[in-house]
Amino acid sequence: MIRLAALFLVGCLAAWPAYAQQPTSQRSASQRPTGVDLELAFVVDASGSIDAEEMALQRQGYADALIHKRIQRAITGGFLRSIAVAYIEFAGFECTQMAVGWTRIHDQASAADFGQKVLNAQRNLCFGGNAVSEALKFAAASIDANKFEGTRRVIDISGDGPNTMGETVDLVRDAIVKRRIVINGLAIDRPSMPDLPEYFRESVTGGPGSFVMRVEDRKSFAEGILRKMIREIADRTPWEAKQRAALER
């Protein structure tokens, strides 16, 4: 018995160098994901209709909202007292990028650090339209692949125009909702698109309890994203309960 134990120990020590050289992602593949109250993907329009000043206003809106006392109360008021967020920007076809990767937010410091990364992220100057369907697919895939497991999963998309390229957006939306991911929208007004909020409701957003908020311009964007995030984080109603409520209307 002692000899068998010794041989087992030698075998483990011999195998250790090969294990240690494996990429961290491979070593951790079998580990349980980190539980959070919410997985929330911010999907933000960075197309050619947005100049540098407007882009800065958008990013500042997210950075400020995450450290706001009402958001902090909503985060720490959850069962797991944390959420996971990612910041994604999109524009034309094949221009969607993960500007700031999935991060656990559990206090003021982690929120401030994530916000600073959003402000410092390099903008991908890739214009030519609005690939909304591509952005939604990208966000949903990142939710499925991240290292977190949320009791709720939400895509939070904002923009000032409709899908203009790629797959039909409502079909993409329907496929994402089937994966129990809710899509909410923030429609930014512009004179040429007076019906954009309705378009978002009909073709972009979906899932039990999903909603669209409207902001008049990018200067009021910060207030809009704050109201939207409070609603998304504080609403802890289970998927099934929201689904039943929707059917009973």
Image (cartoon, rainbow, N blue to C red):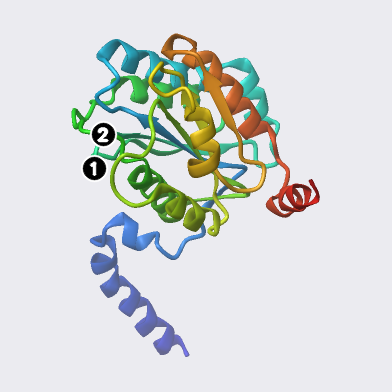
Furthest residue toward right = 248
* Contact, mark 2 vs mark 1 (Cβ under 8 Å): yes
| Rendering quarter of residue 27 | bottom left
State whether residue 136 appears in this view. yes
At horizontal 18% and vertical 28% (from top left) the residue drawn is 125
Q: Position of residue 170 (x, y in %)?
A: 46, 49
The residue under label 2 is 129
Q: CA distance from mark 2 to mark 1?
A: 7 Å
Describe residue 21's horizontal placement relative to residue 235 as left or right.
Answer: left
Q: Position of residue 110 (x, y in %)?
A: 48, 27
Amino acid carrying label 1: it is Phe
Q: Earlier in the sequence, mark 2 or mark 1?
A: 1
Secondary structure under badge 1?
loop
State whether residue 107 appears in this view. no
Up-down: is 55 above or below 8?
A: above
Residues 128 and 239: in front is: 128
Amino acid carrying label 2: it is Gly
| Number of the front mark, 2 or 1 | 2
